[in-house]
Image (tube, grey):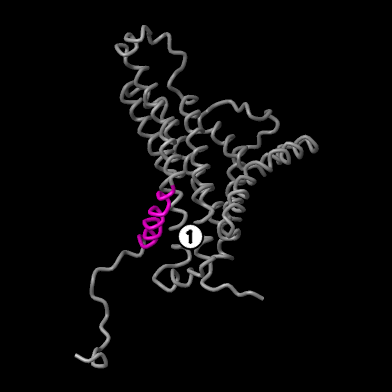
């Protein structure tokens, strides 16, 4: 049949559900991410603390294994409690920050540099789907080293200790989940926003480091000069660590008590920072950029 005799027919095959179309972006992004030997090596190292954590929990409840080393339960100088999980949660979120520094700066900048956004957005993919798809790259990677294994280890400890420990320490599971997702969402928003505005990878990575380091002297100086705790709210690292202490029901030793703002203001600080990132993304993630 000649070409001109062909008539248009609507596609009658199976279509992808609207809610899951953003998943196409991380699927192809992971192929490029794990081509980097540096990233693959760092990603493997991220599981070392979790292995140590598993061994500690196992030895804490295995008298036979301890006896083989000439030890007893009383010789072990730690308890499996909120502080124990807080330490390892802090380690894993720290590794998550390093992974974000490597992966985040190129998530959107490459598409902008190569004028690829029109190709994405001319398909049944909205700007929101595009941003969520890029953020999910960080979300999936950080979930694999934070709340997913930490909750599995919490259940492992609860299985060994019994139902009473589970009920008394259920707040630990909640703290792990909330803290991990607070880090994941904030890092994903910051990384994508900086990637959209700073197309040079080194500049975006440096800016991400700066967000968590430069405010340190500024926030302390503001608190000291004006005898207030509002300066703490401009430091994302201080805010996240203070929330971590509160959720794990621990006393904060990072700052004096008078520098610790109320819990609601800590959450408000993170929400404001997240909204700023969303605003920056909405300004930059467009099919076409008008240059005056």
Residue at the spot 54% in from the left edge and 34% down from the top edge: 244
Q: Quadrant of the N terminus?
A: bottom left
* Viewer-nearest residue: 116 or 143: 116
Q: Is residue 54 above or below residue 233?
A: above
Residue at the spot 76% in from the left edge and 37% down from the top edge: 221
The image position of residue 34, as x and y in percent, is: 40, 49
Q: Which residues are magenta?
A: 20-36
The image position of residue 32, as x and y in percent, is: 41, 54
**Which secondary structure class fits the magenta region best?**
helix
Label 1, secondary structure: give it.
Answer: helix
Describe residue 109's horizontal placement relative to residue 262 as left or right.
left
Residue at the spot 43% in from the left edge and 58% down from the top edge: 133
The image position of residue 45, as x and y in percent, is: 43, 35
Farthest residue, direction left: 1
Q: Quadrant of the C terminus?
A: bottom right
Describe residue 205's horizontal placement relative to residue 69 as left or right.
right
User: Within the image, what quadrant is residue 240 found in?
Assistant: top right
Q: Is residue 199 magenta?
A: no
Q: Is residue 185 above or below residue 260?
A: below
Farthest residue, direction top: 70
Describe residue 47's horizontal placement relative to residue 279 as left or right.
left
* Viewer-nearest residue: 232 or 192: 192
Residue at the spot 59% in from the left edge and 57% down from the top edge: 200
Q: Mark 1 = which residue?
A: 131
């Amino acid at each position: 049949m000649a070409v001109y005799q062909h008539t248009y027919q609507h596609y009658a095959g199976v279509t992808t559900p609207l809610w899951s179309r953003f998943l196409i972006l991380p699927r192809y992004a992971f192929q490029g991410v794990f081509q980097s030997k540096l990233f693959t090596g760092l990603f493997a190292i991220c599981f070392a603390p979790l292995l140590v954590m598993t061994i500690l929990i196992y030895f804490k409840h295995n008298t036979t294994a301890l006896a083989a080393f000439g030890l007893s339960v009383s010789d072990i100088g730690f308890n499996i409690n909120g502080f124990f999980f807080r330490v390892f949660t802090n380690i894993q979120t720290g590794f998550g920050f390093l992974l974000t520094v490597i992966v985040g700066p190129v998530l959107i900048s490459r598409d902008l540099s190569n004028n690829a956004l029109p190709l994405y957005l001319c398909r049944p993919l909205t700007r929101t789907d595009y941003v969520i798809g890029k953020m999910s790259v960080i979300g999936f990677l950080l979930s694999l080293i934070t709340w997913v294994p930490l909750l599995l280890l919490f259940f492992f400890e609860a299985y060994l200790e019994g139902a009473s420990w589970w009920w008394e320490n259920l707040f630990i599971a909640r703290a792990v989940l909330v803290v991990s997702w607070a880090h994941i969402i904030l890092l994903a928003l910051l990384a994508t926003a900086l990637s959209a505005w700073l197309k040079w990878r080194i500049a975006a990575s440096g800016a991400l480091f700066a967000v968590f380091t430069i405010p340190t002297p500024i926030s302390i100086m503001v608190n000291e000069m004006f005898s207030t705790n509002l300066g703490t709210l401009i430091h994302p690292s201080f805010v996240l660590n203070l929330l971590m202490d509160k959720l794990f029901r621990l006393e904060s030793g990072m700052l004096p008590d008078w520098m610790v703002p109320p819990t609601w203001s800590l959450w408000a600080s993170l929400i404001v920072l997240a909204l700023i990132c969303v605003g920056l993304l909405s300004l930059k993630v467009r099919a076409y950029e008008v240059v005056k």
